Image: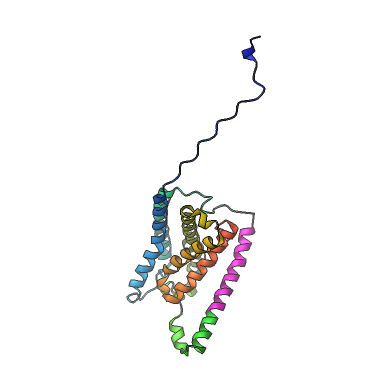
Amino acid sequence: MDPNDIPPLIDPPAPEPEPAPTLPRWRWWLHLLVLAAFPLLVGALSYSHADDRTTPLLPTNVVGLLSVSVRELLFFGALFAIAWLASRVNGRQLLLKWRGVGQPVLWGLGYSIILRVAIAVLVSIAVVFWLGIKGTQLSTIQQGRPHVEQLVNATALTQNPLYFFLTLTLISFVVAGLREELWRAGMLAGMNALFPQQFATNRGRFFAVSVAAVIFGLGHTAQGWSGVAITAFLGLGLGAIMLRHRSIWEA
């Protein structure tokens, strides 16, 4: 037998995989700037036309509501696609993994109650402060409340059950909820990629969540500055929930 035909006792080591190419920082900056421009542009347009608007942002009929939903989702999808082409952000970075069976739903319900209670407490403290210390009249405080009527017509909600159902599901959970959490996950992924050392610390993560929350709040100028403050606080809580669970679904 030829000695060369005898197989070796130890297999040769497999070649080490080549390291993945590092993405240029400017691509992540483009990703971040494109996403940040979305709520800032919406907020600027809403603020500039606030005095001219006599009707809510959402149409008062089902067909119009569906049309607006499709248009908003297509616009955000195109913008998110531009950000993705720049960074090629993946599902892991966007925290898209569903963890557990029904746990995200239960966590989401619990957090929903907690955030609402926290917002109610903060609003109550603010009202007491302005009434007691600043001596502001209650009518003045009522004028500064969030202008929810700028978003949806209350009469349409009460008179049309299908309109109410679509507003509660399609608008709240898809057009608003899922879209905003994808946006927030993209923002956090961009800041993590650009500043990994800072993002590895609690202080850095808090700063990143705060930046995203402020930008998120500024996208709601149609509700007035009190609405901006409330939605910014809401964004802060949602960002913290996402990072705690490493998933968007609880938020």
The residue at the point 52 percent across, 85 percent down is: 129
> Residue 120 lies in what quarter of the image?
bottom right
For residue 48, say whether it is visible.
yes
- Residue 117, above or below 88: below
Q: Nearer the viewer, residue 170 or 105?
A: 105
Residue 25 in percent (x, y) is at 42, 50
For residue 67, say whether it is visible.
no
Q: Quadrant of the N terminus?
A: top right
Instruction: Left or right? Give the position of 209 relative to 85.
Output: right
The residue at the point 63 percent across, 25 percent down is: 11
Residue 60 in percent (x, y) is at 41, 70
- Residue 212, above or below 82: below
Q: Main secondary structure of the magenta part?
A: helix
Q: Quadrant of the C terminus?
A: bottom right
Residue 38 painted magenta:
no
Residue 39 in percent (x, y) is at 41, 64
Q: What range of the chain is rendered magenta? A: 103-122
The residue at the point 52 percent across, 57 percent down is: 199
Residue 113 painted magenta:
yes
In the rendered image, the residue lying farthest to the top is: 1
Task: Count the marks.
Answer: 0
Residue 176 in percent (x, y) is at 47, 63
Instruction: Left or right? Give the position of 76 relative to 125.
Output: left
The residue at the point 46 percent across, 64 percent down is: 211
Colouring chosen for the image of the structure: rainbow
